Amino acid sequence: MSLSKRAIAEFFGTFWLVFGGCGAAVLDAAFPQLGIGFLGVALAFGLTVLTMAFAIGHISGCHLNPAVSAGLVAGKRFPAAEFLPYVVAQVLGGLAGAGTLYVIASGKPGFELGGFASNGYATHSPGGYSLVSCLVAEVVLTFFFLMIIMGSTDKRAPAGFAPIAIGLGLTLIHLIGIPVTNLSVNPARSTGPAVFVGGWALQQLWLFWLAPIVGGVLAGGVYRTAFGE
């Protein structure tokens, strides 16, 4: 499969992740009577990855996340030369997903942008967690997300079950991390909403690039060193 086709798959996959996951949060906030709440949003993010893993995993590997791509490079599962095209496609997909969500959400009378599912720390953390707490949470949660990905896609693992493990893993990670940072573990997911919110969301975006990529690279290196054949 050509790199351009794989990049297009990453674009659509990341679009679906941001539109589906952030959409569940934004639209549920607009209609609280629907009641999907905290668990529903976590599940929505997990389902976006699970469904796209089956849909495009055989095409692009279904990274949908610069931190995942970076971790797979560190784990020697993905060529470094293809890292940048994947990241560009992922960020563009996240922007398109957030933009489409904005068009839909803003069509409701009395719409207020608010946080628009952006990630934040300190006063913009859902639970008021400090910068250090948010940094540690994002590094650790991304680390374990990559460990799940590396392990479930290992050729020694049972075949065909990786999308389920990864989707459920992302759901669990959201259940842990939403109160802390609104959970990123994905720079492309963070960038899309932040561009529309602007201001504080863009000022704090650095953390949601740095921490996930650090966590992903650490996990890729640890898995390759400790568990590789």
Image: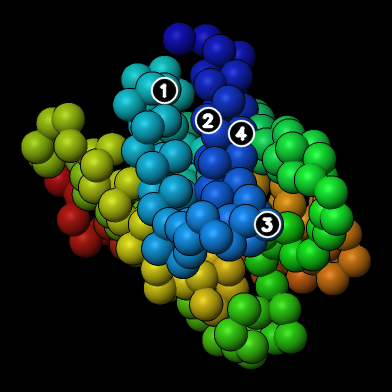
Choose top left, top right, bottom left or bottom right for residue 115: bottom right
Q: CA distance from mark 4 to mark 2?
A: 5 Å
Q: Nearer the viewer, residue 103 or 164?
A: 103
Residue 167 at x, y percent in the picture: 33, 46
> Which of the marked residues, 3 or 1, is nearer the chain's N terminus?
3
Do labels 4 and 2 touch, CB within 8 Å?
yes
Residue at 64% from the left image edge and 88% from the top image edge = 128
Q: CA distance from mark 2 to mark 3?
A: 25 Å
User: What secondary structure is marked by label 4?
Assistant: helix
Q: CA distance from mark 4 to mark 3?
A: 21 Å
Q: Which residue is mark 4?
A: 15
What is the number of the mark on residue 13? 2
Image height check: is 10 above or below 70? above
For the residues carrying marks 2 and 3, which lies nearer the camera in this image? Answer: 3
> Which of the marked residues, 4 or 1, is nearer the chain's N terminus?
4
Q: Dot 4: within a 10 Å radius of its alpha carbon, few (fewer than 14), some, or many (20 or more) residues?
A: many
Residue at 73% from the left image edge and 58% from the top image edge = 116
Residue at 70% from the left image edge and 86% from the top image edge = 122
Q: Nearer the viewer, residue 119 or 74?
A: 119
For the residues carrying marks 4 and 1, which lies nearer the camera in this image? Answer: 4
Query: What amino acid type is highlighted by mark number 2?
Result: Gly
Q: CA distance from mark 3 to mark 1?
A: 31 Å
Q: Which residue is mark 1?
A: 56
Choose top left, top right, bottom left or bottom right for residue 132: bottom right
